[in-house]
Amino acid sequence: MPILLIPSSDMARLEFVKRAAATAGNDFDAGYYYLARETFDNLTEFIPVFENALKRTNALLSKRSKETRESSQAFDKMETGVRDMWEVLRRRVNRNDEPAHVLTYYELPLDGITPKPTTKDEWYAIAGSMIDGDAKAVEAGYPAMQNPSAQQLKELLDKARSEKNDISDADREYDKAQEDVEQLRAKADELISDVIDDLRYLLRKKDNPSQRRIMRSYGVTFKYLKGEPEDEMPEEEVE
């Protein structure tokens, strides 16, 4: 006996209910009543709501991907700005024979070896400390950093933090949309069950192959066991 398969993805659910509604509408016009009118009305009311929710979720997922990409780019630029400032500082200290403790204003150890932060938050903290450190170095009588300047690094840091916050906002929107879809998913499964129950009841007097052929036209799919003969399909239904 073929096994009836229930849609397991949101797009498959949507395609099922759309096809069931379209087929039922055509059958009603032709005088065939294989679906209860109440089920049909529920389908037509539900479809645009579910479809719009899925579109919104996909759009917000794309937005989240965009924000993630932009955040990554902004972070990379900020990190490059930090590394550039360190390199320029090391050369300046060497060239001007400045004391090694100048390095510490910019979060470099006395030996000048480049730190190796392991998280993005550490990079944000280092960049902020370097900006503050430049002001302290100037106050102590040392020249302000150039190429990049502390102001330029601040702009890179502000941009990176802003883009990071945009990801959080996009996450919240996407999570809310996912919750909405989850609630509608339960309704979709209920309607799919209603369609199948209606078909089974209203087709009960037909032979099994005929029942399955009509049910397929409503979007129902069947899985045949290995070696099990499949139903013969009318010529127009054969792919």
Image (tube, rainbow, N blue to C red):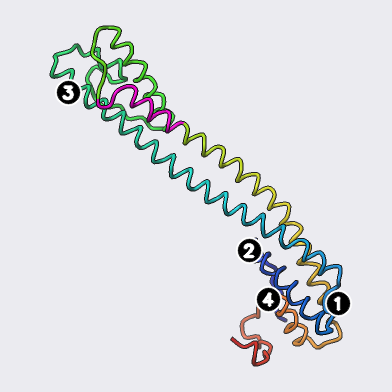
Query: Do callouts 3 and 1 mark residues in contact (Cβ within 8 Å)?
Result: no
Which residue type carries mark 4?
A: Thr
Of marks 3 and 2, which one's residue comes earlier in the chain? 2
Q: Is residue 160 above or below residue 190?
A: above
Which residue corresponds to mark 4? 221
How far across and down, in percent of the image, does residue 201 sit? 86, 77
Q: Nearer the viewer, residue 140 or 113?
A: 140
Mark 1: secondary structure = helix
From this viewpoint, which residue is outermost toward the bottom?
A: 235
* Nearer-N-terminus badge (2/1): 2
Q: Nearer the viewer, residue 123 or 66?
A: 66
Residue type of the residue flagged with mark 2: Met
Q: Which residue is mark 1?
A: 201
Distance from the alpha carbon under mark 3 to that under mark 4: 71 Å
Looking at the image, is 95 positioned above or below residue 227? above
Q: Quadrant of residue 54?
A: bottom right
- Tag nearer the camera, 3 or 4: 3
Residue at mark 3: 91
94 up-or-down from 1: above or below: above
Disc 2 from disc 1: Cα separation: 27 Å
Separation of disc 4 and disc 1 at Cα?
17 Å
Distance Cα–Cα, label 3 vs label 1: 85 Å
Label 3, label 2: how many angstroms apart (C-alpha)?
Answer: 59 Å
Q: Position of residue 145 (x, y in %)?
A: 26, 20
Residue on which the image places disc 2: 11
> At 22% from the left edge and 19% from the top edge, which residue is drawn?
111
Magenta span: 147-161
Residue 133 lies, in percent from the top left, at 33, 15
